[in-house]
Amino acid sequence: MLDWNKVLEFSDNGNPAPDRTVRKTDSEWRTALTDEEFRVTRQQGTERAFSSDMCSLFGEGLYSCVCCDTLLFDASEKFESGTGWPSFTQPVKINAIAYHADKSHGMVRVETVCNTCEAHLGHVFPDGPPPSGLRYCMNAVSLKKVQQSFADKLAE
């Protein structure tokens, strides 16, 4: 289980290697994504809080990267944070997400990106529920819900 110390270690010393990489030009990404998906994932944007109904979806399933389809989160790790963005306590795999120190906007945070395609997802904070204490605060537009449960996916 990842905890805040491990997240900080990754952001300071380098992230685990991804299972695969996906790289495209800005032109290729613009063709594949909506304007809002491009702005958030490729230009490190942030969607408006409470702009997606994904915050209130708690059914079984998986969430993948909207850019490259890499599985990122299991719905069983999702919780209501009250922040207006979907929140999770753990990624599906230790190498699904990469972490970078973010010192923009006059604060220090840890940015989360898809470790496969480097899409900006959001940030992670040390104020989540036990046992991890992590809150992955994600832009809903950077994720897509996959209807299959994680256990079903692993059984394939």
Image (cartoon, rainbow, N blue to C red):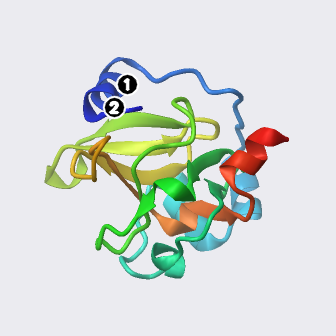
Query: Which labelled disc corresponds to residue 44?
Result: none
The number of discs equals 2
* 107 vs 53: above or below: above
Which class describes the residues within 10 Å of circle 2: few (<14), some (14-19), or many (20+)? many
Residue 128 rendering spot, x and y as whole percentages: 27, 52
Residue 87 rendering spot, x and y as whole percentages: 40, 61
Element marked by disc 2: helix
* 3 vs 25: above or below: above
Residue 45 rendering spot, x and y as whole percentages: 43, 62
Q: Amino acid at mark 2?
A: Val
Q: Nearer the viewer, residue 140 or 88?
A: 88
Query: Which labelled disc corresponds to residue 7?
Result: 2
Q: Amino acid at mark 1?
A: Phe
Residue 57 rendering spot, x and y as whole percentages: 53, 75
* Figure quadrant of residue 10: top left
| Residue corresponding to mark 1 | 10
Q: Nearer the viewer, residue 143 or 149?
A: 149
Q: CA distance from mark 1 to mark 2?
A: 5 Å
Q: Is residue 106 left or right of residue 140?
A: left
**Residue 56 appears anywhere in the view:** yes
Residue beneath the point at 58% across and 21% down: 17
